[in-house]
């Protein structure tokens, strides 16, 4: 076992040992967790990310339901500890199905929400990430393209890969756990996270990554944890600026938000996943007006989402208030690829250089 | 321009020339297309795929609406011919937005369905695929993992990649146009197409590709054209059997169907995309019973989809009728990952070897 695996295993065993000690002391076993709601997240000045506040909830064995929850937790801990010993991994869905084979029938999960939630609880209490439990996500990570050379530790040995010279046009596929990667060498000036595949391909075809020494990260819509994690590591370890380029609508601002601020659901992981220094390139509502982009009208659900963002502490900055109010005012949204209405090269010859210069990235 | 690009360009120019000739002869220009409905697809004995039948529809300039359609077609042909000359490419969405910049305002598409449909019409009439027009899809292709060495012709030169030794755990990312790939060398015994990411990762973690010389193709749900195209080429050019492994529900049988039979929407491309020899591994309704897998009950929409499959000429075989009737009878469906209820290694130690042996693949 690696030191990291050994540590993860130990944290899990300690948790189970605590239930044991509680029993031994004649106490009803319980597990205390931060309350995971929007009203219990707060800005942590030091790390610059949003984390859970002080409110907590307790899972206690003083009811049949609570006792069953702790039984499931111990079975899951046992499974995870063995998985780490054997150097194996599994998906959240496999865990749910596996629980049907456990000898205590009452330990089987009734649905996958329950097992997913338990894994998140264990992440929070043990301070070990799901990736370090060797739990793989269903969603796959995205791809990288740019002047970066890395080493990935795979089950089949080490692979050294240059993310331009050793990959096809599809780029380098980020593995489920990007902490198996070491960065070896690079000529990257900044990280450009891109929402859509069409725009990612446009940038690569136009050679934006070579012309501007950009590392293009394809977010594929709402980014997977692996994508957010590698973005954060590229920022922290290589000291590179991160910019996010999405469609111009409220759902895309949330994509930016998940890269920069983390999500409510995974606020316990903000320090592991979020890159608070990440900046938003666009499409800004301002761009829709300035470049007279082809648009669609805002639907009711878009308007509601924008209004909810105005009340979200993570979007309470002058910049976002101004942009969101402008968008509500013009009643329109636009896609990244709408820039093609000014020609296929407009995005790489004009739009991005201008925006990145304004932002001080170029 | 490559010979292939030159040929594609010529086919397009010929189309436009035909409109010109029709005008010159004093005829109203028109374009004739096969009718694209379920009732107009038929089985082609020779190629073993489903293609359009004899019924046709005509787009004529004898109405303002029809004339506008042909105007849009000529502008699009002009754009595509220039794109091929310049060795560039674009996405379907970019085409839609680009049309706003054309000098004839009436040539602009009113929505993306219209431009998508036109590109499909041009594919059918010119007998050139969208990929050969250099139109990229939005959806990205999937990944390959297995003992295959290939050469990809990228804009940045040739890349030789071994799909186990030169890639990370994420595998080799299939480019948008897999016809840029040459197969160099391989130790592959069969192609295993897998629906879900969780199962793809399980097979790779358990070393199924190395133990059984399998090339694992991740379909990512309904497979992109690039994924179906490379599967077909692997079958045809390397003479390798193709098997498809999905969840056990009607939507997954359609995924198998799109690999094996092609789709109604793209019946003009069946010979380019479909692998009629592809066989279905499972999850079969029979497996649900035999292995007592964890299941979900069939929803009404599942039942309707199964009944519609019973009436679909592509599923009218003894095998499918038996399996679908069994499923309607037991009223249950199961996922690939439900095999984990018998342990994480059951799928690679037991299920797949047994099934592949029965099917004569091993």
Image (cartoon, coloured by chain):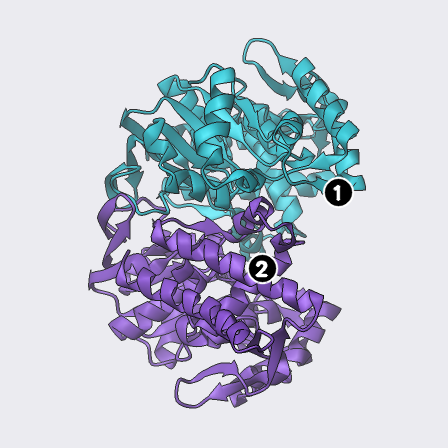
Chain colours: A cyan, B purple
Chain letter belonging to callout 2: B
Q: Are marks 2 and 1 on the same chain?
A: no
Q: Which mark is residue B190?
A: none
User: Residue most toward the top?
Assistant: A46
Left or right, B265 with reference to B176 = right
Q: Nearer the viewer, mark 2 or mark 1?
A: 2
Chain under disc 1: A
Q: Is residue A199 visible?
A: yes
Rendering quarter of residue A144: top left
Q: x%, y% of residue A39?
A: 75, 22
Q: In the displayed structure, would residue A43 be above or below residue B155? A: above
Image quadrant occupied by the C terminus of chain B: bottom left
- Badge 2, how many Cα within 10 Å: few under 14, some, many 20+? many
Residue A133 located left or right of residue A68: left
Q: Which residue is mark 1?
A: A64
> Total label count?
2
Closer to the camera, A144 or A289? A289
Residue B174, compared with residue B190, is above or below; it is above
Disc 2 and disc 1 in contact, CB within 8 angstroms? no
Determine the secondary structure under disc 2.
helix
Residue A146: image quadrant is: top left
Closest to the observer: A143 or A43?
A143
- Badge 1 crowding class, 10 Å Cα cut-off, few under 14, some 14 to 19, many 20 or more, is few
Quadrant occupied by the N terminus of chain B: bottom left
The residue that label 2 is drawn on is: B72
Drawn side of residue A240 relative to residue A129, left or right:
left
Q: Residue at x 65, y 25 (%)?
A: A286
Residue A107 location, x and y as percent?
62, 49
Q: Residue at x 37, y 55 (%)?
A: B84
**Element type where label 1 sits in the image:** helix
* Position of A144 relative to A46 (above/below): below
Residue A142: tell me if it is visible.
no
């Amino acid at each position: 076992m690696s030191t990291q695996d050994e540590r993860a295993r130990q944290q899990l065993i300690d948790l189970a040992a605590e239930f044991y000690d509680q029993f031994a002391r004649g106490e009803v076993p319980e597990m205390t967790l931060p309350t995971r709601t929007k009203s219990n997240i707060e800005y942590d000045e030091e790390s610059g990310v949003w984390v859970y506040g002080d409110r907590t909830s307790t899972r206690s064995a003083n009811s049949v339901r609570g006792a069953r929850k702790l039984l499931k937790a111990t079975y899951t801990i046992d499974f995870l500890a063995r998985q780490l010993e054997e150097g194996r991994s599994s998906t959240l869905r496999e865990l749910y199905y596996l629980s049907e084979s456990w000898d205590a029938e009452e330990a089987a999960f009734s649905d996958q929400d329950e097992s997913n939630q338990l894994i998140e609880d264990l992440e929070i209490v043990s301070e070990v990430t799901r990736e370090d439990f060797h739990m793989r996500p269903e969603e796959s990570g995205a791809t990288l393209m740019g002047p970066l050379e890395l080493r990935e530790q795979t089950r089949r040995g080490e692979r050294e890969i240059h993310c331009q010279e050793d990959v096809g046009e599809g780029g380098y596929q980020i593995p489920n756990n990007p902490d198996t990667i070491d960065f070896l060498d690079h000529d990257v000036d900044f990280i450009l996270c891109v929402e859509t595949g069409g725009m990612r391909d446009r940038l690569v075809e136009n050679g934006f990554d070579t012309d501007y020494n950009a590392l293009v990260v394809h977010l594929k819509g709402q980014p997977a944890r692996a994508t957010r994690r590698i973005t954060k590591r590229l920022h922290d370890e290589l000291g590179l600026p991160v910019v996010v380029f999405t469609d111009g609508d409220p759902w895309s601002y949330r994509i930016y938000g998940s890269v920069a601020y983390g999500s409510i659901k995974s606020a316990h992981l903000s320090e592991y996943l979020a890159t608070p220094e990440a900046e938003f390139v666009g499409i800004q509502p301002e761009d829709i007006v300035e470049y007279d982009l082809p648009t669609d009208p805002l639907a009711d659900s878009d308007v509601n989402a924008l209004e909810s963002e105005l009340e979200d502490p993570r979007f309470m900055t002058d910049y976002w208030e101004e942009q969101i109010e402008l968008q509500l005012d013009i009643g329109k949204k636009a896609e990244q690829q709408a820039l093609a209405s000014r020609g296929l090269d407009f995005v790489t010859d004009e739009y991005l250089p201008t925006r990145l210069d304004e932002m001080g990235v170029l």
